[in-house]
Amino acid sequence: LNGCMILGYQDKFTKDMSRDNVYHDSGVGCVVGDLCADLLVNVVDRVDEQWDVNARLFEPFGRERVLLYEHSDCLAVKSLLLICNLKCKFESIRNAEDLSLNGYIPVLLVDNLLLSGFDEVLFYLMRKDIVPFCNLKNLDYLFLHSLVHGILRKAELYICWVIEEVFQKVTLVRFSAAYSWPANMALPYKKRKEIQELLKCHRWLEKSPREVFDEVEYACDCLSTKLGTHRYFGGDSPTEIDALIFGHLYTLLTTSLPNVAVGGILKKFPNLLEFCEEFERVYFPVLPMLNAEE
C-alpha cells in the first residue's frame, strides 16, 4: 500500500458518507486526507528517531472559545498522544486555524514539521513506528473512521454553521473573538460560506436538522454495535481509533448548545457512555503530565 493508492481511495469514505450509502461503498476507504506532500513520500519507510521532546501543540483558547468540531479534533489528538505516552508543550493561541495547512486543528509542530489535525498526526506516528501502519489496511478501522469523519464531524460542522440559532449565539461570537475589527465582522460570514459550500458538495447542506440528528443516531448505533461488550473498540487496550471516537463522542456528550440536544442521542447507547467514562477515567487524570510544560 503506497501513498498514491491511499489518496486514490480517500473520496470513497469522505465525500458522500451518510447512513444511506455507508454500506454501499464497495471501494476501500482511506483514513488519511489532505496530508502534506512530504509525509506521503516513501510511505512505508520508517523514521527511527526518538520523539521530539520539543514538540508543541497549538490549539484555540479554552473551551469557551473553541467551536464544537474544533474541540472534538483537539481532544482526539490529545487522546492519541495520551495512549502513546508522548509529551509535548500545549499552547493556546488566538489563530490556531491560521497555522494549519489544511484547515484542521490542532497543529502539532514536531521535527520542524507542521502537522494539522488528527490524520496527519496519526500518519506521522506511523512513520515513526509508534503506531502500527497495518491499521490503514484494516477495513473495520476504516469503517469506524468513516463514521466519525463522514458523519459525526459533518454533523458538528452543520450544527455550528448552518443552524441559525447556534450560529448567531455561539459560532459567531466565538469565531469573531480571535480577530479585531473589521476582520471580526467579515471573516465569520466568509467562513460560514466556505463551510456551507463544503457541506453542499457532500450533500449535507440540503438536510434538515432532524435529518442531521438522525444521521448522528445512525452513526452512534453503528459504533455501539461495533463496540458491543468490549472495553475499547480495539479490544482490551485502546488504539488510535478509540482516541478519535472518544474525542467526538465526549465532545457531543458534554457540549451544551441552544436547542441542540445531541447528548441525548448518545445517552440511548449505554455502552458508548461507558466507553467515554472509562477512557476519561483511565487517561485524563494524567493529561497534565502529558504537557511538557508541567
Image: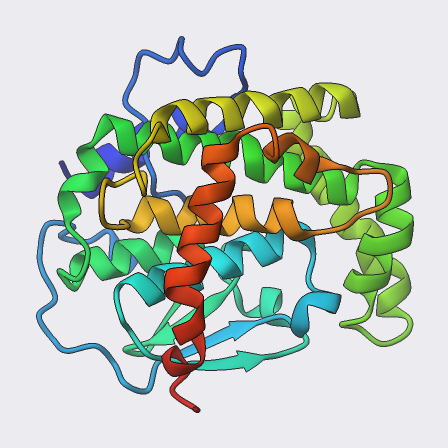
Q: Position of residue 250 (x, y in %)?
A: 55, 49
Quarter where residue 146 is shown: top left
Please tell me which residue is depicted at 43% across the width and 61% down the height of the picture. Answer: 281
Please tell me which residue is depicted at 38% across the width and 52% down the height of the picture. Answer: 243
Q: Nearer the viewer, residue 281 or 173?
A: 281
Figure check: 222 above or below 84: above
Figure check: 99 above or below 160: below
Figure check: 153 above or below 176: above
- Which quadrant is home to the N terminus? top left
In the rendered view, does 124 fall on the left or right side of 242? left
Any part of residue 206 in sight: yes
Q: Nearer the viewer, residue 182 or 266?
A: 266
Residue sticking out furthest to the bottom:
294
Please tell me which residue is depicted at 30% across the width and 17% down the height of the picture. Answer: 27
In the rendered view, does 26 fall on the left or right side of 190? left
In the rendered view, does 158 fall on the left or right side of 8? right
